[in-house]
Image (tube, rainbow, N blue to C red):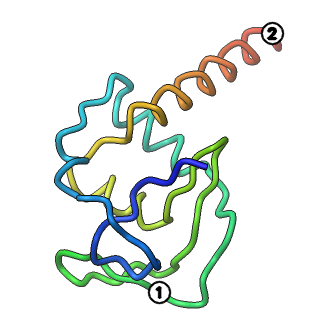
Amino acid sequence: MTFFGFFKGMKYGKCEDEFDNYKKIKNHISRDKILKYLEGLSVSAVAPMSTEDIFDGEEIPQAGIYEAGNFTFPTDFLHYYQKYDIGIPEEYEKYISLKLMDEMSCEDCIK
């Protein structure tokens, strides 16, 4: 498994990712497409707690984990992606790109 988005200061056990490193990532897929993809994921595991934004303390209603392919990241990541100008790791962007191509191919086959 490849873990990402577990930023220092989060409530999830071992959180070592530097938030500023994600601000340096510039993705090739548009933010809208990435956001739509992330919003369509199902939560794999939920925690019986809320969490909060590590910068301003805003409550994030549900703590949990997303698993997509070989990638695991906290549900909080969606909050940070929406609110701050961060990117997703290159490997995960490649994974999403392949998934989007598969969906387009499937849509083309149905027509």
Q: 67 or 104: nearer the eye? A: 67
* CB atoms of marks 2 and 1 within 8 Å: no
Describe the element under mark 1 as helix, strand or loop: loop
Is 21 displayed left or right of 74 in the figure?
Answer: left
What residue is drawn where x is 54% and y is 48%? 2
Q: Quadrant of residue 80?
A: bottom left
Which residue type does callout 1 highlight?
Ser
Residue kind at label 2, given as amino acid type: Cys
Q: In which quadrant is the C terminus drawn?
A: top right
Q: Position of residue 104 (x, y in %)?
A: 65, 17
Q: Residue at x 60, y 90 (%)?
A: 48
Tell me the element at label 2: helix
> Quick check: 73 above or below 71?
below
Neighbour class for label 2 at 10 Å: few (<14), some, many (≥20)?
A: few
Instruction: State the image quarter where residue 59 is shown.
Output: bottom left
Direction from residue 101 to residue 58 in the image, left or right:
left
Instruction: Describe residue 30's horizontal placement relative to residue 103 as left or right.
Output: left
Point out residue 108 in the picture as x, y percentages from the top left corner: 73, 9
- Residue in front for this viewpoint, 69 or 110: 69
Q: Residue at x 52, y 79 (%)?
A: 62
Report the side of 37 relative to 9 (left or right): right
Where residue 83 sits in the image (x, y, percent)? 26, 59
The residue at which mark 2 appears reads as 109
Question: Looking at the image, is mark 2 or mark 1 nearer the viewer?
Answer: 1
Q: Residues within 10 Å of mark 1 (few under 14, many from 20)?
A: some
Q: Which mark is residue 50?
A: 1
